[in-house]
Image (tube, rainbow, N blue to C red):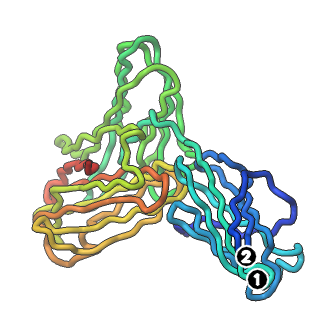
Amino acid sequence: MSRSMVMSTVLCVSAALLGGVPIADAAGPLTITPSANPVPAGVEVSFQISPKVTVAGDSVTFSFGDGTTGSIDFAMACTLFGGCASIAHTYAGAGVFLVSATGTAGGTAVSGSVQVTVTTGTADNELFVGTGAHKVGFNNVNWRTDLEIQNPGPGNATYVLALLIRDADNSSPAFQAQFTLDWGRTVRYTDVLATVFGLSDGAAALRVTPMKGTIIVNSRTYNQLPSGTYGQFVPAIPRSEAIAWGQDARLIGLSHDPSLAAGYRTNIGLVNLSPAPITVEVDFYLGAGGFLGTLSYDLLPFEFIQTDKAFEKVTQDRVDDGYVSVKTTTGGAKFLAYASVIDNITGDPTYVPAIILP
């Protein structure tokens, strides 16, 4: 699967597009016109330029104001359409973004900018459970997830459950189901991935979208053994409380023994709560303050990923006490982060939530 932080597509078109009021620079003006302004997050917007890219060597580079870039470059196809004039971009979240571009068009140096308003594309009352599974993991751990939902009332509640499958674009989830719950009732979906969605081998985050009424949600993911279970409580986080662009969050109390024959191992999970691709940076530290390294992850819309034995990506040494710092570099984005610290002998997991710094 190919991932890229910059989701920009060069299009060669000649028809005029609708849009907002462009802002052109005084010298070598480049007019930039968006196809929609304002535009909802998660909806692709095209930016039309004038003058067009028409001759060999022409190239116009864009900064979309959210940390991503793209370019319109001359190609032979441009001559067939009277020039290349359009580039597309999708914003991850709400905000006001200054789109700027500079380069050459028609052999002349040009630059310009336009302000774009992006409205929210997702509901802040949606609830997300960061991890769930029905699969066999490392050391033959049998992971299962139970989901619990309660309706405190008044009145009936209606909600939609969706699986955000691991390592996939979940813009249109393949696994969804709608339910109604009476006032004052609680329902437990035991082994939810298998019993509700028929997924016999897989991992996924869960999204619960309230359609009517009020609901309370939590979950438990555990190692199912013949003699019983070892489990961890995993809360449901409203999108309004997720990690946002410009925020720094920490996961603390982490450990890793590379022998995997003693001690613990740490898995780190990330869930994109945005309807567009985002980039998340994870910085690893020793508890005493030593910096170990940075990993960068490009997540597709509503994608869930988990990096198992994460500290092995930045060090070969044992980590008795470590932590990570997580943030997104994509404007308007929101995401979840968690760690699962697992006993290498028993398979007993401990869920570690991300703490957003004030």
SS at circle 1: strand
Residue 250 location, quadrant: bottom left
Residue at the image point whose x is 31% and y is 37% from the top: 219
Q: Is residue 170 left or right of residue 79?
A: left
Q: Is residue 103 left or right of residue 285?
A: right
Residue 279 location, quadrant: bottom left
Q: Residue furthest front?
A: 26
Return the x and y of residue 332 as percentages of the image width and height. Answer: 49, 52
Question: Mark 2 or 1, which is nearer the eye?
Answer: 2
Return the x and y of residue 111 as percentages of the image width and height. Answer: 68, 73
The answer to whether any part of residue 60 appears in the image is yes
Return the x and y of residue 299 as percentages of the image width and height. Answer: 47, 60
Q: Is residue 130 left or right of residue 324?
A: right
Residue 58 location, quadrant: bottom right
Label 2 close to label 1 by CB (< 8 Å) = yes
Residue at the image point whose x is 87% and y is 60% from the top: 15
**Residue matched to label 1:** 108
Between 54 and 13, the one lying in front of the other is: 54
Q: Amino acid at mark 1?
A: Thr
Return the x and y of residue 234 as percentages of the image width and height. Answer: 28, 41
In the rendered image of this protein, does residue 27 appear above or below residue 179?
below
SS at circle 2: loop
Residue at the image point whose x is 53% and y is 42% from the top: 175
**Residue density around tag 2, few if under 14, some if 14–19, many if 20 or more, within 10 Å:** some
**Numbered badge on residue 280:** none
Between 5 and 93, the one lying in front of the other is: 93
Residue at the image point whose x is 54% and y is 68% from the top: 4
Which quarter of the rendered picture does the N terminus lie within? Answer: bottom right
**Residue matched to label 2:** 28
